[in-house]
Image (cartoon, rainbow, N blue to C red):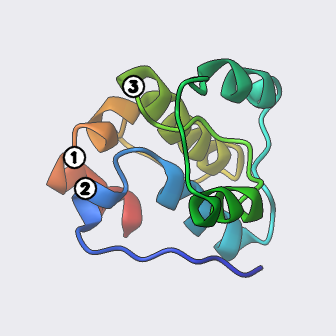
Amino acid sequence: MKVRKHINDLYEDLRDGHNLISLLEVLSGIKLEPAGLKTLRLVSMPSWRHTNSEEQEEEDDDDVPREKGRMRFHRLQNVQIALDFLKQRQVKLVNIRNDDITDGNPKLTLGLIW
């Protein structure tokens, strides 16, 4: 699985859940596709947004159904997808909630990664 992601600031770059989901997909070899997420993604994309052709090509390459992360609700949902995936695989997440990662809590973000 090839992923074009770069992380400069761990706490900031995991906040929207996209990089966290990508990391889990690469490590597990499983594509995370929760039910109903494709529908939510289509509804959440603003119709007024204009992109240049290069941005559009990059978005087309990344066909993973995720929320775009423009609003807090979308970021929380993406992080929750990652946390649910870990819980299904019986990874113990003690006191780590989606809002902790979305808020960029350094202690709990590091706890999740380690």
**Separation (CA) of disc 2 from disc 3:** 15 Å
Residue kind at label 2, given as amino acid type: Glu
Residue furthest toward the bottom? 2
Position of residue 76 relative to residue 13, above or below, is above
Image quarter of the C terminus: bottom left
Q: Nearer the viewer, mark 2 or mark 3?
A: 3
Label for residue 71? 3
Dividing the image into 4 quarters, which one contains the N terminus? bottom right
Judged left or right of residue 90, residue 95 is left
Query: Which of the two labelled residues, at mark 2 and mark 3, occupies the earlier sequence position?
Result: 2
Q: Position of residue 38 (x, y in %)?
A: 79, 31
The residue under the point 32% across, 43% down is 101
Pick the residue in front: 31 or 114.
Answer: 31
Q: Position of residue 32 (x, y in %)?
A: 75, 50
Residue 84 or 61: which is nearer the viewer?
61
Residue under label 2: 12
The disc at residue 91 is none
- Kind of residue indicated by mark 3: Met
Contact check, label 2 and label 1, Cβ < 8 Å = yes
Circles 2 and 3, Cβ within 8 Å, touching? The answer is no
Secondary structure beneath dot 2 equals helix
Count how many numbered circles sit on residues in the image. 3
Identify the residue under disc 1.
104
